[in-house]
Image (cartoon, grey):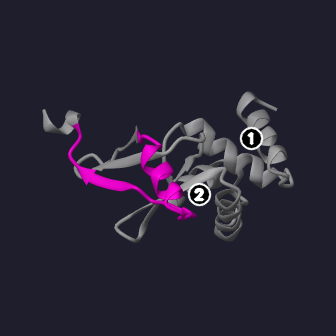
Amino acid sequence: MNKNQKLSKEILEKHNINTSYYRIVILEQIIKSKKCLKIDEIYKTLYDTTSTISKATLYNNLMIFEKHNILNKIIFNQDEIYYCLNDGNIYLYFKCEICNNIYKFPIDLQCFNSINKEGNQINSYNIASYGICKKCLK
């Protein structure tokens, strides 16, 4: 078992999720990429590697990971869905309209704390923005 597979297994065990082969390789792929990935990107890489994974297996496991806050689901334009590893921080996700790269910018938790102090409860959030990155502006 390589380093990313071990980390994947540890994350799954920490969340009391069965450590099946597919769960480990799906999570390993997301950890290894170090970026936000579309479902099709994850599927293509896994299919090229395992050639046996189904889209249903991938979708079902991504939903489990999201439910257990292992992954963040970022939605752009209502139909572009990306998944990023949840490191416990809150980010604004910025997508460049030219190169399609996604950048993460930390957000101060003060805003969320003030919402909770007012007696509200945040159950989910999706903070996505669009523009042109500094590389493409040059």
Q: Nearer the viewer, residue 16 or 7?
A: 16
Say which amino acid is labelled 2.
Answer: Tyr
**Where does the image place residue 15, in percent across and percent down from the top left?**
80, 50
Residue at horizontal 56%, vertical 53%? 72
Residue at horizontal 80%, vertical 38%? 10
Residue at horizontal 71%, vertical 66%? 57
Left or right of 94 in this view: 7: right
Residue at the farthest top position? 3
Residue at horizontal 33%, vertical 48%? 94
Give the residues in magenta.
Answer: 106-133
Q: Quadrant for residue 136, please give it.
A: top left
Q: Nearer the viewer, residue 14 or 121?
A: 121
Q: Quadrant for residue 54, please give it.
A: bottom right
Q: Circle 1 sits on which residue?
A: 8
Is residue 111 a member of the stretch shown in magenta? yes
Q: Quadrant of the C terminus?
A: top left
Residue at the farthest left position? 138
Residue 96's place in the image compared with 7, above or below, is below
Q: Circle 2 sits on which residue?
A: 43
